[in-house]
Image (tube, coloured by chain):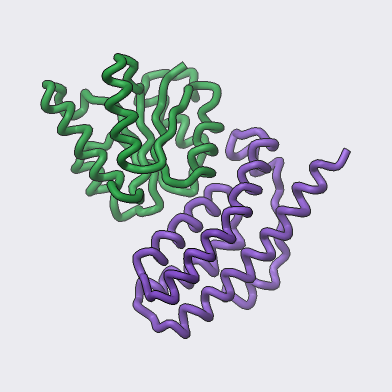
Chain colours: A purple, B green
Amino acid sequence: MDNNENQHEEIYLDVEQICSQLKIRPVIYLKLINSFSQSLDGKFKNFSHALAENDRETMRMILHEIKGTAANLRLYNLTGPETVLHVAVKAGENQAILTRHYEVLRIEAERLQKYIATLIKDTEQP
Amino acid sequence: MYKILIVDDNFENRQLLAEILREVAACDFAASGKEAINAYNTALEREEGYNLILLDIELPEVNGLEILTKIRESEKSVGIALGEGIPIIIVTAYEKRFLEAYNKGCDDYILKPIDADELLKKIADLLDKSEID
């Protein structure tokens, strides 16, 4: 699956199934994905700074954290764009290529953040 | 209830592991290598040592493999042989680092994304507590 294809995929989290698989309570799962979603802006801010400084190690660490947590929480729409960017960072690709891949990841993260915000809001309604 | 130390620099990962383990263990947390060493030493000093450690490899300052080495050296210095110390499960996304972790004395590993059944089974095997399954 390429990045463009990934961007057009509908995001859907089957909370019940994920929680059953992870053996955790839905209320906790929702708290965790909300917390992760809110943490993404800070992570991207740090990544942007590292990108501007061409600090590959910091970029790699941030991407590693996003990848591990997103996968643990079954937020798989981020893993494709993250992997493309991660590979590019490790391969020493130039700033222009990294910026392009980073933009794809950021857009995908924004879609996820919106989806999670709606999911949380719907859950909170009586 | 067992007492488990979860070492991971990511808040959501720590909480996720603790939630999966909520019925079998009370968990303490360390978000860095230094915190992990402090928590391990403090628990030993209070004679309330952990039953098991879940250890991420990629950590700021002191990484998981360095922590593993420090703990095994500390055990060796008081006469605890390799294989008889505190059970340590490496939690990692880096498949390639298993061998290195085994050589440094880890007891088992689990790959991210976490599989809850696999995690509980591995802990049960190490703690010899079949009812965890």
Does residue A123 appear left or right of residue B20 in this picture? right
Q: Is residue B12 above or below residue A83?
A: above
Image position, residue A74 (x, y; %): 59, 51
Count all numbered tags in the image, as a single digit: 0
**Which residue occupies the foreground of this view, B130 or B80?**
B80
Left/right of residue A78 with respect to residue A84 in the rendered view: right
Which residue appears at 82% of the width and 47% of the height? A122
Place of residue B108 in the rendered image (x, y in percent of width and height, measured from the top left) = 32, 37
Q: What residue is rendered at 49% in x and 18% in y?
A: B131
Q: Position of residue A108 (x, y in %)?
A: 63, 67
Q: Is residue B112 left or right of residue A116?
A: left
In this view, the residue in front, B54 or B9, is B9
Task: Please tell me in which quadrant of the rendered image residue A89 appears.
Answer: bottom left
Please state the horizontal and vertical placement of residue B53, each as a whole percent of the image: 35, 31
User: Residue at 54% across / 69% down in the picture?
Assistant: A81
Residue B28 vertical position relative to residue A45 in the rendered view, above or below: above
> Toward which corner of the image does residue B83 lie, by quadrant?
top left
- The quadrant holding residue A6 is bottom right
Q: Which residue lies at the image location 13% right of the left edge and 27% below the top edge?
A: B76
Q: Is residue A40 above or below residue B20?
A: below
